[in-house]
Image (cartoon, rainbow, N blue to C red):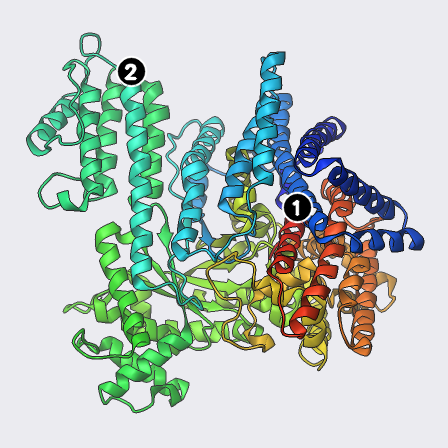
Amino acid sequence: MSEQAESVLTANRPQLNNHMLRRDVRFLGNILGDVLVHQGGRELLDIVEKIREMSKALRAEFIPELYEEFKQVINGLNPEIRHQVIRAFAIYFQLVNIAEQNHRIRRIRDYERSAGETVQRGSIESAIQVLKEQGIAVDDVKSMLEGISLELVMTAHPTEATRRAILDIHQRIANDVMELENPTLTYREREKLRDKLLNEVLTLWQTDELRDRKPTVIDEVRNGLYFFDETLFEVLPNVYEELERCLGKYYPEERWHVPTYLRFGSWIGGDRDGNPSVKSNITWETLTLHRALALQKYEEQLNNLMDLLSFSTNIVEVTDELQQSIQRDREEVELQTVEVWRNEKEMYRIKLSYMLQKLANTLDESRKGSTKHYSSPDELKEDLLVIDRSLRHHYADYVADTDICKLIRQVELFGFHLAALDVRQHSQEHENAMTEILKYMNITDDYSALPEADKIELLHSLLKDPRPLTSQHLEYSENTRECLDVYQTIYKAQQEFGRNCINSYLISMTEGASDMLEVMVFAKEVGLFRVESNGTVCCTLQSVPLFETIDDLHAAPAIMEQLFALPIYRAAVEAQGNLHEIMLGYSDSNKDGGVVTANWELRVALNDITNAAKKFDVKLKFFHGRGGALGRGGMPLNRSILAQPPHTVGGGIKITEQGEVLSSRYSMQGIAHRSLEQATWALITAARLAKYPEQEAEVQAEWEDISRGISEVALEKYQDLIFRDPDFMTFFKESTPLPEVGELNIGSRPSKRKNSDRFEDLRAIPWVFAWTQSRYLLPAWYAAGTALDDYVKGDKERMETLRAMYANFPFFTTLIDNLQMALGKADLIIAKEYAGMIADASIRDRIFTMIEKEFERTSSLILEITGQAEILDNVPVIQESIRLRNPYVDPLSYMQVQLLMELRELRDRGEDDPVLLREVLLTINGIAGGLRNTG
């Protein structure tokens, strides 16, 4: 089960609900069994059942003789039957995942039905209720709401192993299984629905789960847009409506229109770091697709309103404002693709006819110069407000409060750009381009060789100089021309799609202030940054540092102070509302320093950078680059918000949402709504805690010192293995499917930053992916046990301190719970099978023994700190899910080991077998589905 389930599933009536989940799993499993018999005969089903039963028995009691027999059965499968067995287990997990997602919605609805007036924990209403109970005045509530901000940013990082075609089938199966809950279905309708499900599972069996090519960037853009189209366009305004309902209930004296605090952004089509396929034309095409979907959704809504707003002036009196608006439209808008409403008495429908034509004109570039169109979302919103005021004039408040207000909210949220697109590039690319340009202009021969202080001084002077540094007529290298074209594209996009279509330019591997100033100088070249004649600074693009490694996190506060001390840079920040965005990387910091140190250093950086900004009266918006997996900072959305020190969320939060997280959180409306509702609860809770701190400062200080010491020991232990053990990379590459993961077509971006086998050049995603596949999950827990043990040293009082920290220190609570989530999903018995692929027995035995001892040490200490009998006793739903899934994941793992050995042996001889590779990739897909953690 996904980590997100932890915070959605409640403890109410667990036996009833688990029974219903098992019922659905059994029902879908039986359908899959019918498909297996239909497609492969009884023999296929029998061998699948035999393997399943043996795996299940081994999980119940490990018997060495049964273990050897189990492996012999798997290794003895002929290639044809093995291929089908792999697919059978993989598809089973797909069906289980569908059942679990439906079950989450069922439990949400079950709670709401049974709760009555009881307010659900983690709901928006519970957050507002607490504000009221604590006597927080309405003005303070309004101030809090104006201060909170959450932007969830979709990325195209290659962690979604499932094809879009497969996800579409999943959606249909989910809808059909949900329909089976309908109590009004007749026996015949139920049988017909089962036949339909049988057909869908058959289609799933006959659909290739592997991509035959890497997706293009535009493929990835369209995949991201799917979630806006299917769920987010509807769900987001519903979350706002729920917040306003709750505010109205507890603070009825105020008429609430909540400011925009929750929205989605995207990197897909803008993230060019390490992806040579993302060029300026791709970014432009991405923005065009964004706008097309936004306008299409507005057109659908206006057509719905056309059906609803049948009010006749024979019965009601509309406003003069509406009539005058229609008269202006008649004079200015030529109806070309839309027919005017013929009934002159139904004036709303006449108005909507002209609105639909203006929308069509907005989308059609060829009409913009000659016909009336919406030049901005504000113009569309104003037309809707005209309708809203007229409806209220004749007391049609209900339709105004529901349909019109919802569409107005959608316009406020999505504009004509749908989602803000972030641009990202590696700092080295900017330095290379700047070096070439400055040499061309005879300003300095080798900018890249200058000391950092000289770079800053030079760039600062260039920012103040109104003269251009570049020209379209000069010949630059291809990379430099592309670097410059990006800024031209951003400028043009802001003119065409609206100021908010692109706001942030992210700089990977920011190591100094010059990395950010370079971006500002390039922005100045196209007018995104300029100093007016009166000295006023205008800036419509912010350079956003991405601090990724542990060293970068240490350097970050000083870098930001250095920048804020520059008058012209400070003026640019002021032009952006005295708000500065800063991104923190969870993946690379974890890969660089291990899970304990990464979490601690990120917390320290949050505090120190916030304090640095306070000196200059700058608010910060922190962008948390979390992945989906535990080894990359993954956790439920509400917990990821509350994991931050409350005083660091004042300027807003951004969080990356990627890969399997997108499909698990946002493919179904019920789950999407609950996830975003919990995020809202967490935001309001964090804002309350920041305004009214509840912790005792002196106790916190002691706990911070302890955490710092634990982090230092963990870092030493982690880096001893990862960086200082000469045999580690051999162990990693040979005992995981790392080389083969790169052959799975799950993303347009390469798995390495450079064509190199160095650990430093390996991206964090395949690093975590490979460890997850081989069941170690090492990046998510390694070194924690040694560090905790070093602090305790057998001292009972120190153990009591750690228990108090677990109970009362949110940072430590989150760390320990994430560690036990990783330990619960790891399986070193199976990991040992992967270690068996290592050619050098001495390397294998030495390093695996070290990992095994650390696993046992970490597990033991976690249990002692939490007072639990078993790992994950604190979240029995997930514990049970892992326990139920393991017997089905295990066969895939054993088959993967066998296949990898066969494939690598072939390749060592200079041969290859595409069928064998395909089977390896199928096991990767299956294990990813089974563990619900790809990368």
Callout 1, which amino acid? Arg
In the image: residue 286, left or right of residue 370? right
Q: Number of marks in the image? A: 2
Give the vertical position of 405 relative to 372 (above or below): above
User: What residue is drawn where x is 32% and y is 19%?
Assistant: 397
Residue tagged 2? 395
Label 2 crowding class (10 Å Cα cut-off): few <14, some 14-19, many 20+? few
Task: Name the one closer to the observer, 519 or 171.
Answer: 171
C-alpha span from label 2 to label 1: 60 Å
Taking the view exactly as shown, the residue that stands out farthest to the top is 315
Q: Position of residue 520 (x, y in %)?
A: 31, 71
In the image: residue 139, left or right of residue 887? left
Label 1 crowding class (10 Å Cα cut-off): few <14, some 14-19, many 20+? many
Task: Name the one closer to the observer, 307 or 277.
Answer: 277
Q: Tell me, yes or no, if residue 603 can be seen here.
A: no
Say whether marks 2 and 1 touch (CB < 8 Å).
no
Secondary element under disc 2, as helix, strand or loop, is loop
Callout 2, which amino acid? Tyr
Quadrant where the image shows the C terminus: bottom right
User: What residue is drawn where x is 61% and y is 21%?
Assistant: 181
In the image: residue 267, left or right of residue 779? left
Taking the view exactly as shown, the residue that stands out farthest to the bottom is 445
Taking the view exactly as shown, the residue that stands out farthest to the left is 331
User: What residue is drawn where x is 41% and y is 45%?
Assistant: 225
Q: Tell me, yes or no, if residue 437 can be seen here.
A: yes
First in residue order: circle 2 vs circle 1: 1
Q: Position of residue 655 (x, y in %)?
A: 49, 54
Residue tagged 1? 87
Give the vertical position of 397 relative to 8 (above or below): above
Residue 392 is marked as none
Q: Position of residue 650 (x, y in %)?
A: 46, 54
Secondary element under disc 1, as helix, strand or loop, is helix
